[in-house]
């Protein structure tokens, strides 16, 4: 976790999914949060603050003979406390577990 030049908290995750899978897993959260979908991610109005999620380039992770999708995902938090960020990730992680949330 770090700060960017705009003073936002930045969290970077290497996620085992494609862009298509990211947007599909986002669908349940769109019913709970105000989301502005973009080609490269989403902006979420969350609990009085804002979260901008930006997807990096899709890649592949090779493990022996298996090739899995991977995407670097950057989360930019504005106006949210550590507790609010923790609650966000709890719900986000539930939605992005295999099998949904």
Image (cartoon, rainbow, N blue to C red):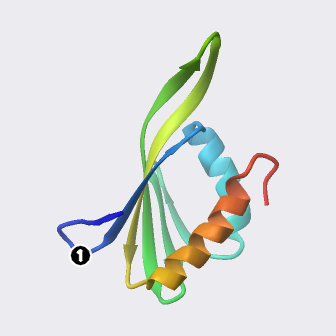
- Residue visible at 54% across and 87% down? 47
Residue 66 figure quarter = top right
Does residue 45 lie above or below 15 as drawn?
A: below
Q: Residue furthest top?
A: 65
Q: Which residue is mark 1?
A: 7
Identify which residue, 41 or 98, lies in the foreground.
98
- Residue visible at 49% across and 39% down? 71
Q: Residue furthest right?
A: 99
Q: Residue furthest front?
A: 64
In the displayed structure image, the side of residue 98 where residue 77 appears, left or right: left
Question: Which percent across, then down, holds residue 72?
Answer: 44, 43
Q: Please tell me how crowded label 1 is: few (under 14), some (14-19), or many (20+) other residues with Cα within 10 Å.
A: few
Identify which residue, 87 or 35, lies in the foreground.
87
The answer to whether residue 27 shows anywhere in this view is no
Question: Which percent across, then down, holds residue 79?
Answer: 38, 85
- Residue visible at 65% across and 60% down? 93
Determine whether the residue tagged by mark 1 lies in a helix, strand or loop: loop
Does residue 44 lie above or below 67 as drawn?
A: below
Does residue 60 lie above or below 82 as drawn?
A: above
Question: Which percent across, then down, holds residue 11?
Answer: 40, 60
In the displayed structure image, the side of residue 4 where residue 96 appears, left or right: right
Residue 74 figure quarter = bottom left
Q: Residue furthest left?
A: 5
Question: Which percent across, then down, holds residue 26?
Answer: 65, 57
The answer to whether residue 31 shows anywhere in this view is yes
Does residue 7 lie above or below 93 as drawn?
A: below
In the displayed structure image, the side of residue 94 where residue 56 appears, left or right: left
In the displayed structure image, the side of residue 15 where residue 38 appears, left or right: left
- Residue visible at 45% across and 71% down? 51
Tell me the quadrant of the picture where the N terminus can be found.
bottom left
Residue 67 figure quarter = top right
Tell me the quadrant of the picture where the C terminus can be found.
bottom right
């Amino acid at each position: 976790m770090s700060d960017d030049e705009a003073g936002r908290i930045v969290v970077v995750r290497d996620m085992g999914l494609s862009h298509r899978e990211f947007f599909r897993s986002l669908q349940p959260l769109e019913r709970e949060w105000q989301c502005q979908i973009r080609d490269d991610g989403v902006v979420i109005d969350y609990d009085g603050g804002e979260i901008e999620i930006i997807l990096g380039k899709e890649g592949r992770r090779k493990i022996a003979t298996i090739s899995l999708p991977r995407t670097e995902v950057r989360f930019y938090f504005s106006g949210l406390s550590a507790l609010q960020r923790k609650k966000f990730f709890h719900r986000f992680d539930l939605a992005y577990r295999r099998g949904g949330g």
